[in-house]
Amino acid sequence: MTQPPSQQPPQGGFGAPTDPPPGTPVPPAQPPQMPPPPAGPPPAMPPAPQGAPAAMPPAPPQGAPAGAPGYGYPQAPTPGYGYPQAPGQAGPYAQQPGPYGQQSGPYGGYPTQPQYPGAPMPDQPGGGRNPFKGKPAVIIAAAVAGLLVIGGGVYFATKGGGDDKKPVAKSSQDAKPSGSPSADLGDGKGDGRTGSDDLNAGRKDGEAKVWLQENATQLTQNGAEQSGPWVVGDTVVKAMYKEVTGYSVADGKQKWSVPLDAPLCGAPHETTADGKIVLGVQENNTKNAKCNQLQQVDLAAGKAGWKVPVPSEGLFDIMTSFDMAISGNTLAVARMGAVSGFSVTDGKKIFGGTKDGNCRADAFAGGAKLLAAGSCTVGDDTQAMDQIQELDPTSGKVKWTKQFPKGWKVARVFSVDPVVVYLTNKDKKQYNITAFKPDGSVRSEMDSKDSFQPECPWAIMERDLRGCLGTAADANTLYLPTEPKQGGGDGYSRTNAVVAFDLNTGKEKWRSSPGDGRTMLPLQVDGGKLLAYIAPTTEQGGAVASIAPTGGKPSVVLQNPASTASIENGFFSKHVAYSGGRFFILNGRVSSPKGDTKEKALMGFGN
């Protein structure tokens, strides 16, 4: 596909929508989404072929300035940016190679990755296990139907939105366990202890104190995903099913619980600076209930705030689940067919709409900036192009837009400030990591022949731009983990390295490895030093380590107990947070307690 270089990308934002023109067709109803299965080991990004350049998808002209027209109802197509040219016209996209040139092989990855839909997923050291273990066959079928597996890499086939879903691939008291741990069944539901043994009884000198919360909530047959953890002052918070719960960071004791009227159907990764969050909640408890309610919760006070319905933005606004992000005091909400923005303070709507010209946003990334990812229509092709935009969170107006050639998808946002985007091309079996300047122009492309493997959740039905564990960035450096490879003398353990990239050049600055058959993932940058999570082994607890700005060997700042390594290993699709010298791990999905067995839900480490 080519485009006229003289045309500008779509101007606009997310202003007040307009009514659809008479005769606008009604879209077919979308079948209800199946509950998503828990995530499995993420596939790796492919290594570039030897000697190939790090070329990114060619960049079109820059997007709309702030203050452009609102994000309204689709308009009649006009020739210009995003539409086909007359035959014979050459454009900036003509005959452009993809990132790293043509590749003859599929994505790289674990040798134990499934090579076809439905292939078994063996248990993985370091917390991985079969994501379909104990799940109903209908869930397995739904998940497998959404997967397209090519060689060692997994792609996700979806309807609408133009998203690939291809992952690459943050002085204490003695803590007591929150319940009586059960025998270790190898599935993350036990820790090898019996009775009421203190989890800290086997702690060695230099190891952090630990506490554990188990799930006591009765859930539906398929269990429930857990969102969080969010750390607000001396409280760590998680949300699950129909409750939001806060625990003491020191000993894990429950401080408060906020019940919800109906099940959760969306949660942002961020809170406001003063500890407020807004969650997506179903309209009722029926099977086919819409996801159309917003509930504010003050995590510092442990109290529910305002609750408002999400108004429909038009005929194409299908509310089955929410993709949510908070930037400043604005909550951005995306779903299949529309987007909206609301004030976290009072729930008032700030912006909303369905399409901006020929483009539709379907996912947000929040934090220091508000980014929107989506797809653009070219002629009759509804998934022809993907784009990334920065929006003004106070108004929804577009600050800049970057569109990519057909076939390139915005899979993840590795960093919001500075902006670093991970792109995939399923057909060409290629990937690209690009950093952008504040005005949306290209800053650099990461140049490496390694495979990189953050831990990213499966996203069969929707994007999760900020869902990866294992990426970090500061003003001038991006940190990524390489794919683990066999390491150590036992022939079984794996090791990897963290690579630091110069965002101004895209070149590698240094790499650091934990060694001794260990793997580690970047967490965050603190005081100029990188903090990384060293994963547990069967005999060693995990750890938080710091790496100097110039690289070098990791230095452990928090060592988790070896005596609880089996519990730490059993946490599946873990979510983590590091704050105030304490480390928290949340199980990504839990099931109902059965008898005297409760699934491990949240763990805290710190002295």
Image: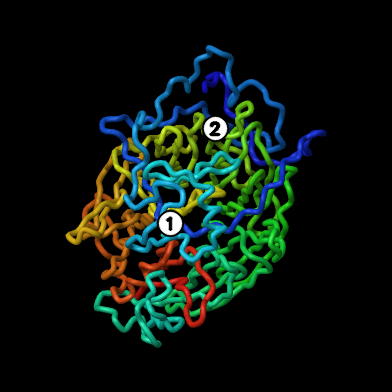
Q: Is residue 593 toward the left or the right of residue 291 in the image?
A: left
Identify the secondary structure beneath mark 1: loop
Please count the marks in the image: 2
Q: In percent of the image, x 67 and y 34: which residue is there?
A: 69
Front residue of 305 and 489: 489
Mark 2 crowdedness (10 Å alpha carbons): few <14, some 14-19, many ≥20: many
Q: In percent of the image, x 38 and y 42: which residue is there?
A: 151
Q: Is residue 91 visible?
A: yes
Query: Which disc, if any, is residue 40?
Result: 1
- Dot 2 or dot 1, earlier in sequence: 1
Q: Is residue 581 visible?
A: no
Front residue of 111 and 472: 111
Identify the secondary structure beneath mark 2: strand
In the rendered image of this protein, does residue 75 appear above or below residue 547? above
Residue 392 rendering spot, x and y as whole percentages: 59, 43
Query: Which disc, if any, is residue 385?
Result: 2
Furthest-top residue in this view? 88
In the rendered image of this protein, does residue 259 appear above or below residue 14? below
In the rendered image of this protein, does residue 267 appear above or below residue 339? below
Residue 141 rendering spot, x and y as whole percentages: 54, 54
